[in-house]
Amino acid sequence: MQPFNKEHEGNADLLVLRLNEWKESSPGDYVQLIQIMQDIKSLETGRSDLLCEEDKQALVKAGAPRHLIDGDKHLSDSWVVRLFSFWRLNSRLEAYLCYPSIRESFPPKPRLFVSWNSPTPVGQMVHLMVSLFEFRLLRRVRQCEQCDKWFYASRNARKFCTPLCSKLNWQASGTGKRRRREYMRKYMQKYREESI
Ligand SMILES: [Zn+2]
């Protein structure tokens, strides 16, 4: 496990940029990225979707024993669901082959490094996502709870892309509304007192 560095931050920023771009301009690529990201995140948090019949059939087609998928008295349902989630994620990842190349960074301090490439832009982003996951940073790539824009949470607790979204969300919440009403009431009271 390497410490967090600028390179990871740059990768996260690039992924966020593409997600926001593709959400509008390239829905097909966007959906592919989102599916993989959701699969990884659900395995990280331990939450998995339940198996529907279509999923079960796909699993059987891929070579999993039918009795295992239908439930085995020795295996809990959650274990089977988790097994399926790994299988689905890894079969999705198989579609994005990557190849390495050796490069050199720019002067003044050139150093050799390995760069992983993919023949397609979406493959490049999938690789980027997997490397962020490796450093436990993919969980910080998230959607703003106010405006749905993708952003990278520099602090883990951040839920909004900007201070403005955070403010708007707070204002719309029950507490925000109550406090604003209270403020307006006091303001009007003061105004009336002053106008007398
Ligand atoms: Zn926002």
Image: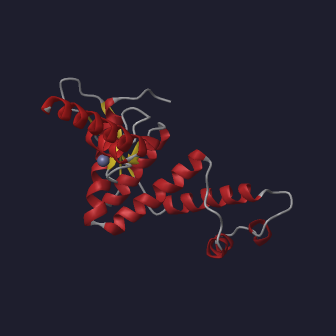
Q: Residue at x 47, y 57 (%)?
A: 36
Decide which of 60, 25 is in the foreground and name it. 25
Decide which of 70, 87 is in the foreground and name it. 70
Q: Which quadrant holds residue 159? A: top left
Counting from the top left corner in percent of width and height, residue 160 is at: 35, 42
Q: Is residue 9 visible?
A: yes
Q: Quadrant of the C terminus?
A: top left
Q: Residue at x 31, y 52 (%)?
A: 149
Furthest toward the left, the residue is: 195
Is residue 86 found left or right of 129 in the rendered image?
right
Counting from the top left corner in percent of width and height, residue 16 is at: 32, 48
Decide which of 156, 181 is in the foreground and name it. 181
Q: Residue at x 36, y 29 (%)?
A: 5
Furthest toward the front, the residue is: 196
Is residue 57 found left or right of 139 in the rendered image?
right
Please tell me whether residue 93 is drawn above or below residue 13 in the rendered image. Answer: below
Is residue 175 found left or right of 194 in the rendered image?
right
Furthest toward the right, the residue is: 73
Furthest toward the top, the residue is: 109
Counting from the top left corner in percent of width and height, residue 84 is at: 65, 61
Here the colouring is secondary structure
Q: Is residue 11 visible?
A: no
Q: Residue at x 68, y 59 (%)?
A: 81
Counting from the top left corner in percent of width and height, residue 31 is at: 40, 64
Decide which of 103, 144 is in the foreground and name it. 144
- Number of numbered labels in the structure image: 0
